[in-house]
């Protein structure tokens, strides 16, 4: 149960004056549904931070106006000049003792303007003056006010992210109404920390954000937003660490292997493990042997050998007489894992099977019976693994691949398939260090930051789409000498709004150039069709594979040495890096061609140049964060990853470590949050809707 003091904040926004059905609908589009799926609430408006501010404090005389600089001027209305034609502007001449200026209105309603600006009356006019025909004018002033209205005009007006149907003024008014409902709350931050940083209280900081006195008060690095961002980061870290403590408290089971399978796998590998792989395997074995549950994140750049680490982890629990599962986000990736693991597992005498949406009827029933009987040691699959009828005899280890494609809930669903299951989460998307803490602060981390020996660097080039014919000619020459080529297109079918070459169109064009040599894979094809197309590519029957991003993760064809990415400027940096990682997996020299169409924006150019200049996924991840912000880097809100409302990792990243350390210290001193500060921190968890963590506290 949420503390009743917070009830006014979690009421629907329709409780605020001025929010009728029309405005409520627009607010729904702006703020999105609440985490419970309902209408936007008062708290959603409070936490909708401004992104800038209009400074209306300047009160010059007309003679002192500067073109383009917003000013608020006291004037007397001299005369109205209605338009001579229906399309002409309506002009009103106003003056002070230093000069005159025209106010210009298009599509104006005369009687309304006569009431707004009566001749002979004094008014305050606010807007940005511009020079027209040698004299100043203000087109559609932002405000026309009498003295009473001026007293209510905020000297600094916050500006907010908007959608159609809403204005900055309306959002500011609603945010101020929301502030009036803010109850008096105890301080949850350490007083000495607040004093050291120069931070005001929670309510005062929100007030500074929505009722700023200077434009600097709404800046991301300003004290108000920084204080509120820290509140949000601390709530996040507390929640993650409470989840972690709860998982650890449900004591684990020790799995210690005798090493026979691991040695057999090592002997069957065509190469020695890298130092990073060996360290990761050692850390995982230590976790598995411990009496507490493992929750570890294994970060590995493209081609760094995470699958082998996962297999060696599985071998440890299988040696101990138990079972393991590997869950992948797509069927292609699950089958790719199976193809990589099967020969190695066979050499070690490990029984492996697959379960995806495609296994049906008797085949599926037989696999489930073998699994329940303990006749399958390692089960590879998609989200089909956590369906109710999938029962393990004794699941010890759950490996979740490409974590960002799954929510935390799905991770826990797989872990609940056994008693005290150890969890290893893998991602091939390098995550900047600050984001590892914000999204995976409940886990231990291992990073595979070395590539297996013998991998040659990939030659990455930027090529204008104007040179498409040249590119196709070069592909033809490369194919003649035995090369295998991926050609990636961003969309499956033509969209009227995007001039993107569709996969089907590109396939048709390349098929014309190279008859019978081109295959096609996209997300709308049935599983068997995709497999067949990939199989023909693997065998070399069709040496060119045109694909959408379904090949982004997991497709492993060492013979493929050329990657063409069409309209590369439309892809994110991490995605481009993933795609490039599909080549350069064998001993041959590989090339990645980034085909771009101009004009390139600054961000798109920075992305492509970063990719050309480095293959280090961790450097690329930091650059991606700088260019896009944390919400995009971690994937969509649906992924279960942390997406913050107030904290902007690019601006507040240094606070993440502070919050992480602070949360650890708080919970070491007050693990049940029952001291006065602990009680206040429970309010903080509710405010930022980390309610699940509070429920864990109650559950003990």
Image (cartoon, rainbow, N blue to C red):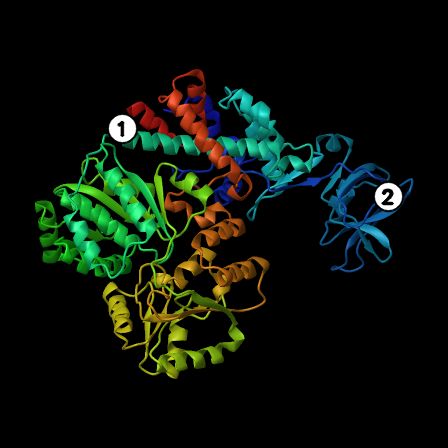
Residue 371, position as x, y percentages in the image: 12, 48
Give the residue pinned by disc 2. 64
Q: Residue at x 47, y 40 (%)?
A: 644
* Residue closer to the observer: 253 or 32: 253
State the separation of the CA atoms marked 1 and 2.
Answer: 70 Å
Give the residue pinned by disc 1. 249
Q: Tell me, for residue 85, which label it has, or none.
A: none
For the residue carrying disc 1, how many other residues have a C-alpha within 10 Å: few (<14), some (14-19), or many (20+)?
few
* Residue closer to the observer: 469 or 48: 469
**Decide: marks 1, 2 in contact (CB < 8 A)?**
no
State which quarter of the image contains the N terminus.
top left
Q: Residue at x 26, y 47 (%)?
A: 399
State which quarter of the image contains the C terminus.
top left
* Residue closer to the observer: 324 or 551: 324
Q: Quadrant of residue 119?
A: top right
Mark 1 or mark 2, which has the lower sequence index?
2
Q: Residue at x 17, y 57 (%)?
A: 359
């Amino acid at each position: 149960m949420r503390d009743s003091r917070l009830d006014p904040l979690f009421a629907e926004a329709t409780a605020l004056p001025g929010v009728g059905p029309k405005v409520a609908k627009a607010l729904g589009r702006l703020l999105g549904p609440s985490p419970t799926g309902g209408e936007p609430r008062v708290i959603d408006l409070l936490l909708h931070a401004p992104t800038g501010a209009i400074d209306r404090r300047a009160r010059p005389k007309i003679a002192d106006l500067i073109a383009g600089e917003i000013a608020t001027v006291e004037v007397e209305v001299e005369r109205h000049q209605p338009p001579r034609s229906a399309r002409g502007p309506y002009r009103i001449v106003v003056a002070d003792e230093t000069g005159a200026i025209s106010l210009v209105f298009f599509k104006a309603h005369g009687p309304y303007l006569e009431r707004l600006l009566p001749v002979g009356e004094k008014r305050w006019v606010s807007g940005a003056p511009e020079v027209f025909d040698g004299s100043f004018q203000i087109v559609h002033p932002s405000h026309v006010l009498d003295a009473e209205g001026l007293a209510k005009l905020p000297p600094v007006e916050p500006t907010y992210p908007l959608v159609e149907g809403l204005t900055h003024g309306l959002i500011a008014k609603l945010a101020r109404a929301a502030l009036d409902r803010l109850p008096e709350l105890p301080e949850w931050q350490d007083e000495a920390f607040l004093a050291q940083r120069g931070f005001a209280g929670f309510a005062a900081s929100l007030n500074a954000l929505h009722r700023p006195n200077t434009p600097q008060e709404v800046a991301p690095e300003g004290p108000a937003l920084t204080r509120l961002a820290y509140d949000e980061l601390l709530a996040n870290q507390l929640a993650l660490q409470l989840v972690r403590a709860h998982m650890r408290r449900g004591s684990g089971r020790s799995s210690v292997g005798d090493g026979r399978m691991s040695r057999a796998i090592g002997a069957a590998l065509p190469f020695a493990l890298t130092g990073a792989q060996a360290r990761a395997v050692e850390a995982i074995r230590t976790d598995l042997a411990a009496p507490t549950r493992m929750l570890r994140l294994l970060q590995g750049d493209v081609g760094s050998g995470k699958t082998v680490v996962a297999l060696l982890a599985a071998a440890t629990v299988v040696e101990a007489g138990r079972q393991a599962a590997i869950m992948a986000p797509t069927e292609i990736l699950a089958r790719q894992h199976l193809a990589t693991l099967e020969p190695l597992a066979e050499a070690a005498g490990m029984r492996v099977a697959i379960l995806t949406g495609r296994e049906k009827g008797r085949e599926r029933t037989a696999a489930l019976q073998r699994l329940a009987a303990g006749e399958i040691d390692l089960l590879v699959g998609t989200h089909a693994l956590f369906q109710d009828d999938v029962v393990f005899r004794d699941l010890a280890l759950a490996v979740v691949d490409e974590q960002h494609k799954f929510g935390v809930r799905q991770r826990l669903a797989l872990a609940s398939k056994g008693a005290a299951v150890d969890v290893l989460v893998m991602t091939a998307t390098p995550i900047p260090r600050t984001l590892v803490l914000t999204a995976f602060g409940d886990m231990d981390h291992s990073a595979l930051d070395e590539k297996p020996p013998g991998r040659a660097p990939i030659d990455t080039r930027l090529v204008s789409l104007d040179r498409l014919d040249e590119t196709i000619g070069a592909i033809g020459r490369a194919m003649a000498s035995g090369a295998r080529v991926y050609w990636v297109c961003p969309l499956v079918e033509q969209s009227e709004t995007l001039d993107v070459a569709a996969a089907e169109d590109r396939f048709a064009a390349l098929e014309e150039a190279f008859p019978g040599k081109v295959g096609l894979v996209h997300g709308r094809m049935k599983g068997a069709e995709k497999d067949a197309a990939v199989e023909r590519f693997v065998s070399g029957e069709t040496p060119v594979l045109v694909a959408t991003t379904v090949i982004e993760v997991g497709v492993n064809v060492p013979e493929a040495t050329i990657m063409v990415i069409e309209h590369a400027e439309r892809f994110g940096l991490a995605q481009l890096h993933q795609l490039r990682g599909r080549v350069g997996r064998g001993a041959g020299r590989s090339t990645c061609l980034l085909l771009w169409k101009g004009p390139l924006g600054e961000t798109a150019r920075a992305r492509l140049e970063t990719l050309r200049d480095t293959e280090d996924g961790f450097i690329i991840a930091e650059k991606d964060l700088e260019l896009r912000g944390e919400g995009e880097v971690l994937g969509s809100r649906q992924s279960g990853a942390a997406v913050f409302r107030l904290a902007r990792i690019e601006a507040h990243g240094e606070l993440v470590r502070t919050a992480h350390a602070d949360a650890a210290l708080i919970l070491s001193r007050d693990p049940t949050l029952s001291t006065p500060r602990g009680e206040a921190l429970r309010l903080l968890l509710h405010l930022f809707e980390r309610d699940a963590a509070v429920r864990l506290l109650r559950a003990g």
